[in-house]
Image (tube, grey):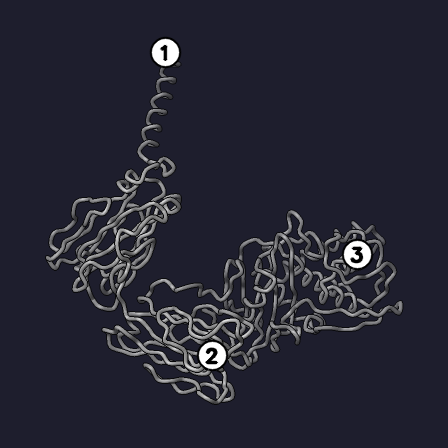
Amino acid sequence: MKSLKKVWLAFFLILAVVAVKISDVKVVQGVENLQEAADSISYRTHVQTYGWQDWVSNGGMSGTSGQAKRLEGIEIKSDYREGIRYRTHVQTYGWQDWVSNGEMSGTSGQAKRLEAIQIELTGDMAEKYDIYYRVHAQTFGWMGWAKNGGYAGSAGYAKRLEGIEIRLVEKGADVPGSMEGAYRHPFVEYRTHVQTYGWQDWRRDGAMSGTSGQAKRLEGIQIKLMNQEFGGDIRYRTHVQTYGWQDWVSNGEMSGTSGQAKRLEAIQIELTGDMAAQFDIYYRVHAQTLGWMRWVKNGTQAGTVGKGKRLESIEIQIVPKGGDAPGTTDIVTAPNAYVLDAQTGNVIYDKNGENPIAPASTAKMLTALTVLEYCLPEEVVAVGSELDKVPADSSRAWLQYNDRMTVRQLLEALLLPSGNDAAYTAAVYAGQKISGEQISIDEAVQVFMEAMNTKATEAGAVSSYFVRPDGYDIEGQYTTAKDLALIGKKFLENPILMEISGIYSVRETFENGKNMTFTNTNELINPKSTYYYSPAIGIKTGNSANAGSGLVSAAVINNTTYICVVMGGTPDGRYQDSLNVFYDLETGWGIQ
């Protein structure tokens, strides 16, 4: 009895300790008033000579004013489980990594000044409140209020931060003061000469110059630096219709032409001297049919060369060295991608390439490979009741019972219109050949799938398992972008399959006299498509609820064959992503 009492006593003691620990960590849902939330954010700074200051909160100043003492570090904490993160720009070192909830950002004992800061709320706090902050900087004094991750301070001027105030307000409430001049840095101004309209007004720091949706070409551009306190310059050159790449020009000179009706097709921009050491220059262009392309930086080509695509507008922005890009710099927007040099096997690009994904109709590459492992192209195949296994919402080649065709024609029906009916006919025919017996349709498909998975392993696709010959969504079936690239590599090694996948349209007469036209679903192969790409040589599209829209494509660029896998994207996005990859490979700089 005594031991039982001890057990219960221990149990209640544990509950009490847990309750105390839980009460130590507040949850943001319990914050019902602004004052409580504001008091929950506290901060302190490490000041030259004086060291760490006392904690302050709710708009209190941390640091000094009028004493010419630099801030060297800062700690910011929240009483709530989901709270706050921040990073600082440090003399010599530039932008530091993000830290959170009481960790120090900056340095201690190194005599390095803080020059700028970013602060943002996280989790539910970010949904309920805005965080404002302003800094007192050498020479500039109190600067404007920054908000929710914006820059506060300066970059490129070697000016120390001396004090900081941080304030929490309800989401969308009034600003504590002026936001003008929260961050001081050199900026870039630019203007473009537009078809019909001539020279446009000067724009600065990320604003668009040119037009959108008017099909007007850029013909010339001028770019210059403003507010500059570091040495160095900005230089740029353009690729002009007919004339090709022009010479580099700098700081306000025109690149391009005026009055010659020649389109700009691509541009490179870079900083020089100390400016290049302190800042990155980002830019992106809106190109004919391609729309807004990704942000690139520091001399990388933006636009296209040799495609006859006009530039229609441009945005340019300077950021502190190592700072965040103004937008996406990823060449691929889809969640999964893998790019391979088909000749060397070298990996050029990998974005979640080993994550499990559904294959959809890209599985038909492996279906075709397996068929030709056991069947000759000239063998004649009869379509049977395996058509009943094809789901109603499948892509089809519109084969019919008793159609008789060669294996090659069947592969065209499989690969060009992406016929699930052709996939089952091929699987049953090859499965029966493999078994050497006249087995049932289900048994033949099972035999074929075993051979298909063996073929996948032989290709190096060891993280894949295929359940259906058409790739239609089903539980237990999976692959990866990397595996699809390896299967694509093996696919291209077969001259018959490489030839078929590069055909846009073909008309065939079956053995039973029926005429059929098969058209490729791959828009890179379609000469009439916006996404047509003449160096493309195949390979296979895929679409399904689980897989999204995908494309395994191949192109020959500078005598090298590349395989590009883009999975989980949108119907149009998969083509644009693939083109972005191929265009980057054309430049010779490699994918960034």
Cβ–Cβ under 8 Å for marks 3 and 1: no
The quadrant holding residue 342 is bottom right
* Number of residues whose C-alpha sits closer than 10 Å to that of mark 3, classed few (under 14), some (14–19) or many (20 or more): many
Q: Which residue is mark 1?
A: 2
| Mark 1: secondary structure | helix
Q: Is residue 257 above or below residue 422?
A: below
Q: Earlier in the sequence, mark 2 or mark 1?
A: 1
Q: Residue at x 35, y 36 (%)?
A: 32
Quadrant where the C terminus sits is bottom left
Determine the residue positioned at 37% across, 81% down. 222
User: What whole-number distance in Å separates the C-alpha atoms at marks 2 and 1?
Assistant: 85 Å
Q: Mark number for residue 266?
A: 2
Left or right: residue 374 versus residue 262 is right
Foreground pick, 131 / 581: 131
| Type of the residue with mark 3 | Val
Residue 153, placed above or below residue 292? above
Question: From where the camera sits, is residue 486 visible?
Answer: no
User: Total marks drawn?
Assistant: 3
Amino acid identity at mark 1: Lys
Residue 511 rendering spot, x and y as whole percentages? 87, 69
**Residue 350 x %, y %:** 50, 63
Q: Secondary structure at mark 2?
A: strand
Q: Which residue is mark 3?
A: 428
Lower sequence index among marks 3 and 1? 1
Q: CA distance from mark 2 to mark 3?
A: 52 Å
Q: Nearer the viewer, mark 2 or mark 3?
A: 2
> Which of pointers 2 and 3 lies earlier in the amino acid sequence?
2
User: Splitting the image into 4 quarters, where does residue 323 fall?
Assistant: bottom left
